[in-house]
Amino acid sequence: MAENEFLLATEPLRKRFQDILPQGGNLNLCLACGACAAGCPAAGLAGMDPRKFVRMIALGMDEEILKTPWVWICTQCQRCIHSCPMKVNIPEMIYRTRASWPREKRPKGILGSCDMALRNPSGSAMGTPVEDWKFVVEDVLVEVREKQPGWENLQAPMDKEGAYFCLNQNSREPVMEPEEMVPLWKILHMAGADWTYPSQGWGGENYCMFLGDDQAWERIVRNTAEHVDRLGCKVLLNTE
Ligand code: SF4
Ligand code: SF4
């Protein structure tokens, strides 16, 4: 069976998007004004832009839509829906189109990062073990305290029970650019914020969302929420 061929045997995309389109599915309300494409960072890439995407769905060009790699280039930034006078929910249409792809055919980088996050308790797409995460935070903190005058009392709490804020972190930073974590620690310090990192569930990015995998996305979020609750924090500060 050709890639995505099975999808074409099911209901048309336009029908599958009915609940998120203006007036219950009336794509003729699209004015073809191009406001969506004007601010789109993915416009022109892979021969596609959001206006063209909408027109192709309106014209029933499902086969082309289900094959275009452009849906994976869209950043899901939401600019298009904010600029659209008819409030056509293009990002959600793109998300659902992604979810229509067979999982194993989705981009390997996003797929691998999602699966890695699912496999380890940190929720980190880099697969960083708990002990490494704790070590890096402590190591960076000690270095700042020792080498940066005025920051001798800087804090980077780990698993502090009852802290008001629970902070997550992009997984790349402790591995690739650990010093990039410090500016936010300093801001929180200056603000007198009561915060903590969790030792688990701290991976801030969620590639499963970008993968169009609802169930995996939910598992990552639930893992994080579990550790926010475990520590009794009131607010999750999502840095991603
Ligand atoms: S901004 Fe809205 S109305 Fe204008 S072309 Fe895009 S989808 Fe159509
Ligand atoms: S959500 Fe996607 S289609 Fe819409 S403006 Fe952002 S990149 Fe473009």
Image (tube, rainbow, N blue to C red):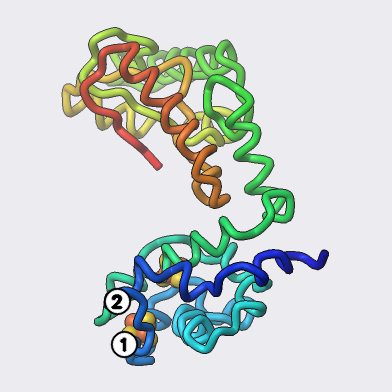
Q: Is residue 169 visible?
A: yes
Q: Is residue 212 above or below residue 18?
A: above
- Number of marks in picture: 2
Determine which quarter of the picture holds residue 218: top left
In the picture provided, is 235 more to the left or to the right than 100?
A: left
Q: Are marks 2 and 1 in contact (CB under 8 Å)?
A: yes
- SS assignment at label 2: helix
Quarter holding the N terminus is bottom right
Q: Which mark is residue 22?
A: 2
The label number, if any, that marks residue 44 in the structure image: none
Q: Where is the C terminus found, in terms of image quarters? A: top left
Residue furthest to the left: 192
Residue located at (30% from left, 20% from top): 151
Q: Residue extending furthest front?
A: 10
Most foreground residue, 126 or 11: 11
Residue drawn at (25%, 23%), measured in percent from left and top? 165
Residue shown at 68%/41% (left/top)?
A: 112
Residue 55 point in image, percent of width and height: 48, 87
- Inter-mark Cα distance, 2 to 1: 7 Å
- The verdict on label 1 being within 8 Å of ligand 1 is yes
Classed neighbour count for the residue bearing mark 2: other residues with Cα under 10 Å, few (<14), some (14–19), many (≥20): some
Residue of label 1:
29
Q: Residue furthest right?
A: 1
Q: Quadrant of residue 70?
A: bottom right
Q: Amino acid at mark 2?
A: Pro
In the drawing, does residue 10 fall left or right of residue 205? Answer: right
Question: Where 35 sits versus 3, above or below?
Answer: below
Secondary element at tag 1: helix
Q: Amino acid at mark 1?
A: Leu
